[in-house]
Each structure stands twice: as structure tokens, then as C-alpha cells.
Amino acid sequence: MKKLILSVILIATMLSSRADEGMWLPMLLGKQVYNDMVKKGLKLTKEQLYSINKSSLKDAIIIFGGGCTGEIVSNEGLIFTNHHCGYGAIAAASSVENNYLRDGFYAFNKDQEIQSQLTVQFLDKIVDVTADVEAGLKGLAWADRVKKLQEVYKGITDKVADKENGVTGRIYSMFKDNQYIMYVYKTYKDVRLVGTPPESIGKFGGDTDNWEWPRHTGDFSIFRVYASKDGKPTEYSKENVPLKPKHFLPVSIKGIKDGDYAMIYGYPGGTNRYETSYGIKLKNDIENPALVGLRDMRLKYMHEQMIKDPAVKLKLASDYAGIANYWKFFDGETKQLIKFNTYGQKQKFENAFTDWAKGKPDYENIFAEYDKNYSSWTPYSKHRQYLREGILGSPLSAFAASLMGLEGTLVKAGVSAEDIKKAVDAADASRKNFLKSEDLPSDKNILAAVAMAFYNDINKEQHPANIYDKIATYGSLSDESTYKKWALDVFAKTMILNDEKWNSFIANPTAMELQNDMAFDFAASFAKNYNSKYAPMFTAFNSKNNELGRAYLKGIMMRDTAAAAKMYPDANFSMRVSYGNVKSYKPRDAIFCDYITTAKGIMEKYVPGDYEFDLPAKQVELFKKRDFGQYIDKTRNDLVIGFITTNDITGGNSGSPVIDGNGNLIGLAFDGNYEALSHKIAFDKDLNRTICLDVRYLLWCVDKLGGAKNIINELKLVK
């Protein structure tokens, strides 16, 4: 009886969202959590939150680029998002002469706005297509389901596709393939840069402050979406006009208080809240430590060169930021998972589930099967990380490995001269792009370091044949200098970095010449070794995990149907809504963290000339004068820079609007706090905080610092 009671308690605990946990599907808010949202301070109706017949909040929220969120803030298609989301476009628009990344940029009229390669996607509607998908997969075993799934998806999405109007459907698996939801999007391709603060504001605090509170980063950039004169999505043209959106967010400068309602719409990229203890153990013991160590190595060598030369910094800035961001995340994730014994908590739940599953053939052997599956893959897990984050972490090595497609064309029997030319032209174009971003000094060190790390840390039986025999001709394989000598030779001799050799090759390409290239030989040896031996094992491991995960989650929901009705699916870059409150917190004994940061705090961190904590001279001058204009917080008599909320978000929510109870924009979400970096796996009800840019600081930067009153005048300000 005690075991049964424990089982019920644990299952109920896992099923029900706690505190402000939950990334909710917009179309189901009315059935799941709307009443709770109202209790916390929401003033809007269900239809104002999500509607397919009338304009609603969801119409102001966009997928920005490939992996962020943005929001429409004017009736002329103006977009707010994070600085780090627009980083690549800002860097691409910059040059040494016009370094917008370093100095900032604002368009004072629409003619000054800068073309980008970005796209944005608006959500039209959400449709549950579970019945249609299951009908297409009926009677199939798991392996056959997997093979046919994309075909079934396509049959459904083709019915809503409208290429002329940029409309596409995308089906998302929810609850580990127990439900299927189609999101219908409209994509716009003409997106232009309108404004960005100097990098010293947009990245203030750099890696030191990343994932930390208190935070003083002005993490924003501004874009505009254009359409044809009849409002349709189209390629860039000077004839295009600003898009008239269905809905845009008013911007509140009224200020916030501790306890105020806060709601976030956006596109969280991925969580795994229903992960098993086996997955936690693999992550803690192997995957995360390997990733953190290898990224640390790469960042070290990149940083050494970036601080020497502004041109190199500009070239490497985007890649460095991306690598650094999740280097710190995965380091913190492991520490928090261990600190809160997430592994042990998962085991308790799984033991209770196994007790409940006894005598139920569909569920009673799930964890025995999990045990076998993880035991078979774990010995090779580090190899996979060292290939992806190590060997292919060298830009030269990664590009060389990409030439395996060209090699495949060259060795294939009966390939036409036209097909060979296409493959060669594609490789040539790819090489040109690679050379634009390649920094030789840092990459030489990276290549030497990752080759040595793989040799030392990966089981010798898993090494590719002959590669280390070749490196050994340069000296002892236990000596760092050996790898440095070898790497210098690779860079000196590869045709990839030599225009004369490359042009000679593409004029008369042969597989043998490519295979004899030192860089290609190295990278391809590792990739082919993995692809032939270990990739099939990883595919089988993932497939079995997915099959077991579907059955496990189905069993959880079957165990308690009432609680299952209020479950939320893992994040998967489909639009979600989270809600909570602005709230201070106590991360450790005797430490209190206020809910806002101010200009006073920026000046306390400010270090003239510092790589991470410098500020524009004009900003320092305005702060000293306390020239905050209409954006001042009268309660604090200061300019508020950032604030924290209890909202549940994850990667992909970058740039998401933080919205008050009346539907007004009060900030932009841009980070999480270090004390809760286990949030992809487990939400912490006490410590989880979303770090947000206060919109008043954004407007101050645009208006008082940037002088772009034209942008301010375009907004609907709520005072």
C-alpha cells in the first residue's frame, strides 16, 4: 500500500506543472491555464491571446531568422529582437570602415535601412493533426513508422502549402510522438536592419556576465519586415513597402513592480523534461564534460587572436559568441543537475512507475530495455562528442570534411561531366565562403589541440586507421609540439588554402588528388570512421530511445488521466506561452537579488577600455548627468536596465516579448540565471528566473544615445 501511495504522489508531482513552470500551446490556454493566468494578473480575454479569426497577440510574434523570436511593435512592421539574434546580420553589414557591430547604427529614415539575408515567419494557425498522422501510420511497427513519418507529414502539409503567398505547414511531434500538431506559417524574405546599439552595450558583460544575474546588457536590435505593395511575401526589392501587421504590441514605459504579471510568447527551442535517469547520467558523466572541455579549448585560441586585431574580432565574433554561449550553459547545467540530485529524483519516479507497470505488458519492461540500450551506446558516446566538438571544431577540418560529397561524386561510376561540374562549382563556392571567415593563427592551434585530445581521450580501438601513424612521423604522440609541427604542415600544404593548387584541382578534379590532400585526409578519415562504424549505432540508439520514450510517456498519461490533461509538451521551437511574475529571489544563504538592475549598477561595473565592461563615452556622460528623459523610473529615480521574472523559457526564446497583463511590451527576454541552468531537464520553482531587458533602457539607447527619435515616434507608447 505504501508503494502505491508513493507511486501516485510521484506521478502526480511529475505531471502537474509547479509554480510558474510550463510552456503552453497557445490554442489550449483556455482549457489548461487561463484561469490561473487571470489570478496572477492577466486582463485579456482568451481570444485576445490566440485567435485564428481575429487579430490576437500571437499575430505580433515571429520566428526571427533561424532560431530566435521577435515581436512586431508598430503598424509599419518594426521588429524588436535581441542583439545576439541580429548579430550575424549586423556583422555582415559591417566593415572595418563602417563597423556597425562596434559603433552601433540607426537608420534615420527608411532609405537608410540595410538589406539582410534574414527571414521572419508569422504564425497563421495551429491544427491538431494527430488523427491524420496516426491514420497514415496505422499498423506499422516502430522502424516502419519512422521511415514513413516524413511522407505522411508531407501529405498533410502539402494541403495547406501556398508558395505564392509564402504559406507552409510544419508538423511537430508532441509528448514524444503521442500527439502531432501542425503550425501554419507565412514567411517574409525582405527584412532590413533598422538599428543596433554599439556592441559594448549589446554585449555588455560579455562571457563573464553570461547566464548571470544581476545583468546590465542592452541586448536588442531593431529590424523591419517588408512586403510587396499588395502585402504579399516577396524577395528584396526597392519597390517593397513596410508590412502592415495584423497586430503589433504597444510599448509600456509605465514601469514594473515586484510581483507584477509577466507573460512571454515565443519559440523555445528544446527541452527534455521527461528525460530518464539514464539520459541524465550520460549527460553528467560524458556528454557535457566533453563538450565543455573542447569548447573551452577552441574559445581560448580564438580569443587570443580576437584581442589582437579588430578585423579578426569582427570576423570571428559571431562564431565565438555561439560557441561561448552554450559552453557556459552546459557547464552550469551539469553542476545544477548534480547539486539538485536530478538523477536521484528521476530514479525515484521511474521506480514508482515500474511498480505501477507490473502486469501491464506494454509498460513493465520499459526500463529494462532502457538499461540495455544505454549500455550498448555509452562506450562510444565520448567519441561522438570529440568528433563533433573537437575534430570538426577546427574550421579547416570541418570544411575539408564537407568535401566528402565532392569525393563521392568523383568516385561514383557513370557520373556525367555536368554532375561533376555542379559538384565542383558548389565546392568552389563553399570554399570562398569558408576563406572569408577563416582565421589561420587560431585554427592552426585548434587543429593541433583537437587532434591531440582525440588521441589521448578516446579509446585507441576507436581511432581511424593510420592517421596517428602519419602524425607520429613528426615526433612523439605524447608531445604537444608534435601536433603543432604536423598542423603547420597541414596548413602549408593543403590545396584548400592555396589558390593555385585549388584552381588546378577544380580544372581537372580527381578523387586521388583530393584524397591525398593532408587536410582532407585527416578530416575524412575521422568522419568516415564514425559514419561506417558508430553512426549506425547512434541511429539505432536514438530510434530505440524514441520508441521507449513514446511508450513511457503514454504510460505516464494513462496512469493519471486527470493530471495528463494539464501537461505541457517539451519545447520544440513551436510557439509557446509562459506566464509568471516579476520577482526577486534568494539564490544562496544570506544573498538577496533585487528584481531590477539600474544605470547605477552599470557604472559600478564600467571599466574604460575593457573587452567586456567598456561603455560609449556619450553614454557615460549622459549617465553622469542623469539625463534619462521620460524613461526614468520614478520609484528608483534611476534608469532601469533589466529585470527578472519567474517565466519558463529556454533557447529560442531569445528576443521574446515580455508582456504585461494588458498586452503591452515591457521587456525582451534574453537569458536565464546560472542557478537554474538545469531548466532544459528540470524546472526549479524557487530559483528559475528569466533575465529581461527593460524596454525603457532600449528606448533610451535609441532616443537619448542614438538620436533616432523617428523610431520612437513610430511606436505606440503607453505612459
Image (cartoon, rainbow, N blue to C red):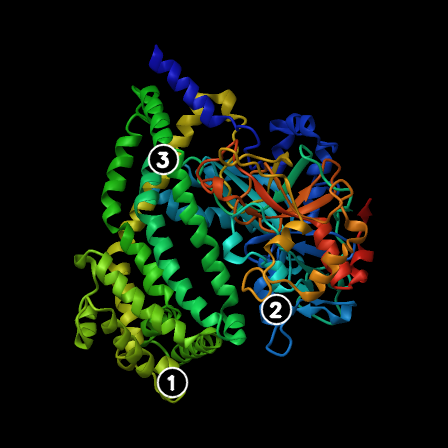
How packed is label 2: few (under 14 Cα within 10 Å), some, or many (20 or more)?
many
Helix, strand or loop at disc 2? helix
Q: Position of residue 579 (x, y in %)?
A: 62, 35
Mark 2 highlights which residue? 102
Q: Nearer the viewer, mark 2 or mark 3?
A: 2
Q: How far is the residue under mark 2 from the one under mark 1? A: 32 Å
Mark 1 highlights which residue? 498
Query: Residue 276 got which mark?
Result: 3
Between residue 496 and residue 290, name the one nearer to us: 290
Between residue 497 and residue 26, name the one nearer to us: 497
Residue 416: which quarter of the image? bottom left
Q: Is residue 101 above or below residue 341?
A: below
Amino acid type at mark 1: Asn
Q: Is 620 left, or right, of 718 in this rendering? A: left
Q: Is 96 left, or right, of 294 in this rendering? A: right
Amino acid type at mark 2: Arg
